[in-house]
Image (tube, rainbow, N blue to C red):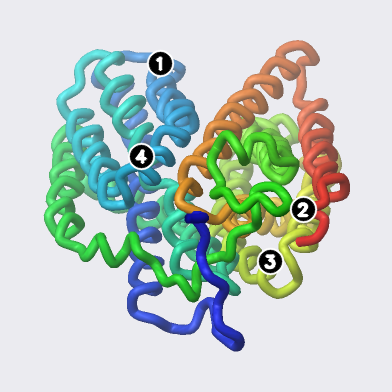
Amino acid sequence: MPDRFPSAPAGSSGLRPHLGGLGVLALCFLMLLLVRGMADAYGVIVLPLQRSFGWSRGEIASAYSLAMVVSGLLSLVSGWMFDRWGPRAIYTSGLAAVGLGVGATGFGSEIWHLWISLGLLLGFALAALGPSTAAALVSRWFRERLGTAVGCVMAANGLGIMAVVPLAQVAVDALGWRDAYRLMGAAALALLVPLSLLPWRRIAGGRADRAPAARPASGADLAPWTLARAARDPGFLGLLLLFTATAFSFPGIYVHMVPYFIEAGFPPLEAAAIFGACGLLAPAGALVWGMLADRMGLRSAMLLSIALSAGALLVLPLLGAGSGVGLAGVFVVLFGGTQTARSPVVLTLTARLFAGRRLGTINGVFGVGGGLAIGLGSWLNGAFHDLLGSYAALPWLSLLGLAVSVIPLFTVRALARQ
């Protein structure tokens, strides 16, 4: 029997209020908010760790970097777990990894302890509770407004930082970093009880009238989509190129943005404030671009977001100590408003083109590609800075990535029709 969902009845609304669908949306949002916030709360204890152990900033940052790499590499594994054992297994194991990883950090005394607790355990949790898994589950409940639904979930990335990180700082100030992390880990583990009691069979079942209709794997071939079949499809390869190229261009330069502004002549506090303002726009951007994808079409929304992102990169060489607030404001709006644009659109496209019971595994490939692309972008921009003595190449490398990303939108038929 082909592994596909039936079409929605005429006149049905993909985002019409429904307790089950909205509940699943809230679940995915809260889990992503929790794990993203817990991961980025690590910045709160950088200085306490340095004071406690005398580690260099590079050593301390290595645990966080490892978590990012592990989360990318394990996205495929978590997607396979989702498809093989269902959302209950992946969500409970992901939350357990959050609790154990964060809690164990409070007992660490060597840098390799943090590599295990934060790098490996929290890295797995980021993959398990991340956007790829969430999109696979949400796609079972929404159809016509799937882009809006995925955008709602993606907004948790930015909101997690704003909600969890300040609370972590309060806990560290009141209890010290060790007890604060132990408490945070225990709180996450306590959530396992209510999480495990949720009606997971109903959650996993979805709504047949709301799920995306599957596209045949090849012409008249009605076999269900698998990772092997998808990997031979031009639509999948085009989406993978698009996603990795844009990950190289934008997330791949995050770590260099504040020093870029400082080298351009901005005081350090202003540089940090500019980049922080970009971060504040990320949650709204994810939601807005998901809604635009539903209203103007996925391909059109993607092209518009890439054009605006290119505009942000073209502003960078113009920034300087005398450029004024106006030009910096243009950069904040363009960069901050489009930095989260691609993920909801790509995940929605994937759900539409490759709907079926292997969607989690297929989504996982994008997590792997994105993680590797971010790492490559970060390293290349640093290497060119060392070679040239400045960040002069940064905007142009990122623009090259954006230029590559639009190629499949014009050359791959399955994407050009969206």
Report the residue at 33% width, 71% height from top. 23
Question: Which one is earlier in the sequence, the residue at label 2 or at label 3?
Answer: 3
- Mark 2 or 3: the one toward you: 2
Q: Where's residue 105, x and y in %?
A: 22, 29
Marks 3 and 2: in contact by CB < 8 Å?
no
The answer to whether residue 175 of the structure is visible from this angle is no
Three-letter code for the amino acid on which mark 3 is drawn: Ala
**Disc marking residue 161:** none
Q: Where's residue 327, x and y in %?
A: 79, 54
Mark pair 2, 4: CA separation: 28 Å
Displayed quadrant of residue 338: bottom right
Mark pair 3, 4: CA separation: 29 Å
Three-letter code for the amino acid on which mark 4 is drawn: Met
Q: Where's residue 304, x and y in %?
A: 80, 59
In the picture of the structure, the residue carrying the numbered disc 1 is 59
Would residue 349 be found to the left or right of residue 300 on screen? left
In the picture of the structure, the residue carrying the numbered disc 3 is 293
The total number of labels drawn is 4
Mark pair 1, 4: CA separation: 32 Å
Q: Residues within 10 Å of mark 1 (few under 14, many from 20)?
A: few
Report the residue at 67% width, 42% height from top. 236
Mark pair 2, 1: CA separation: 43 Å
Would residue 119 be found to the left or right of residue 178 on screen? right
In the picture of the structure, the residue carrying the numbered disc 2 is 415
- Report helix, strand or loop for mark 2: helix
